[in-house]
Amino acid sequence: MSVVNAIRMGGVDVLPLIEGGKGVAISNGISAGNWALAGGVGTFSAVNADSYDENGRVIPQLYHGKTRRERHEELITYAIRGAIAQARRAFDITGGKGRIHANILWEMGGAERVITGVLEQAKGLIHGITCGAGMPYRLSDIAAKFNVHYYPIVSSARAFSALWKRAYSKTANLLGGVVYEDPWLAGGHNGLSNSEDPTKPEDPYPRVLALRKTMREYGLHETPIIMAGGVWCLDEWSHWIGNKELGPIAFQFGTRPLVTVESPIGDAWKQRLLTLKEGDVYLNRFSPTGFYSSAVNNDFMQELRHRNDRQVAYSTEAVGEHTAEYGVGPRRRLVYLTPLDLERALGWERDGFTEALRTPDSTLIFVTPEKAREILQDQQDCMGCLSQCRFSNWSQHEPDFSNGKKADPRSFCIQKTLQDIAHKSDDPAEVENNLMFSGHNAYRFAKDPFYSNGFIPTVKQLMERLLTGR
């Protein structure tokens, strides 16, 4: 017997079970279509999604432009084609009867151009746009142009209020719901503000209640709030369901759909998730977006942590305690370290970390020659996948297409690593050495008897399980 009833969302009655969108190619048309077919709301990622050739094979996203701007245009073309391909796959699976949403990141490169291009060419295939990673003020304008519902992702009542006052109040009729994403527990990029402590998670109930109170002030009494981040089974949320204080509530599942038969990730990735322990997901700030994000603490993440630990401040002049000379780069240009930091730097060199790379914060990080070559090559190959990137110093804004800062070698090329893990995750080595986003509840795969003996359910079986509350 189901523990939840259908709710009104986006103008139709649906089960309040939403598939969380996961880019680059992790929430696709097949996973979204099957989720919608089971009665929930399926969500595919419109962030550089896969497109296919005439034989149904994935088209590799290779870049041929000589400049970042040229490669950026190629990326936008790939993104539009891929999202349309996934929308059609989802539509075909449901026979046009299921609810399908497209998920975009506001801070992705060319976000407005991509979603506009997709909606222009996929009319009738997409029923809603879910959007986070930034403050998507213009989301409502795009939704109004194509008469689709929109679902902003926020992590506080204050953020929603700012969006409402600036833009959303003009298009209230198309606001299908508001996604509250727990900034401590959700996977992928998180909406922690500067005033919030990343080490001290807060109870989501008062935060969601504050969001509902704000929404009621704007007349949004029946607009659903979608709880995202930290949702595993509905029994743990029984005090939310039917709660008049909170109003209509739906639940978004981002991590659990990864381990399904229809999930496009490789078997090595699924097996890794099934064996995680509590604490294996790491809230960090290495992303080139500048946002916090949650990812599995694998070899990729540990290399970033060690890279950032091998860091010392420098001065271009001898000043204060910075009196020890140190030569940087092929020409050994002099900078000044403290005597203690010079000892540390020489020790790292003896361990093989002989290349010192400058950061925008007047520090040096120490890496191997091989890693230095990789970092510099990745920076040169930038295709502008973000609106602004601290790793490569790209910005999509004219006239110079630069964020005005030096490229930061403490970060990484997020497009490269997400494409690699999306398409090579049958290989355990690739899973270990690429960015693996995950919600913090992923350790529960190993503890939940539903997954005993390595059982991987179909989407239909997972939905049936969720509807029992367990």
Image (spheres, grey):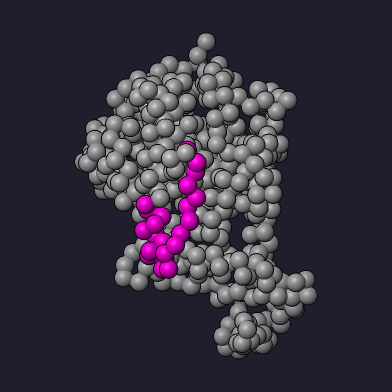
**In percent of the image, x 67 and y 25: which residue is there?**
455
Q: Nearer the viewer, residue 331 or 74?
A: 74
Residue at the location (31% across, 28% down)? 10
Residue furthest to the top in view is: 1
Q: Nearer the viewer, residue 466 or 80?
A: 80
Question: Would you say 157 lies left or right of 407 here?
Answer: left
Q: Quadrant of the C terminus?
A: top right
From what the image shows, is residue 72 above or below residue 363? Answer: above
Q: In the rendered image, which quarter is residue 270 located in?
A: top right
What is the x, y in percent for residue 13? 35, 20
Q: Please say whether residue 186 is visible from this viewpoint.
A: yes
Q: Which residues are magenta?
A: 56-77
Instruction: Say if 406 sits above or below 80 in the image.
Output: below
Q: Position of residue 95 (x, y in %)?
A: 37, 22
Q: Between 251 and 78, which is closer to the camera in this rendering?
A: 78
x and y percentages locating residue 215 in the rendered image: 32, 35
In the displayed structure, 312 sits above or below 322; it is above
Closer to us: 52 or 20: 52
**Does 182 sit above or below residue 341?**
above
Residue 329 among those drawn in magenta: no
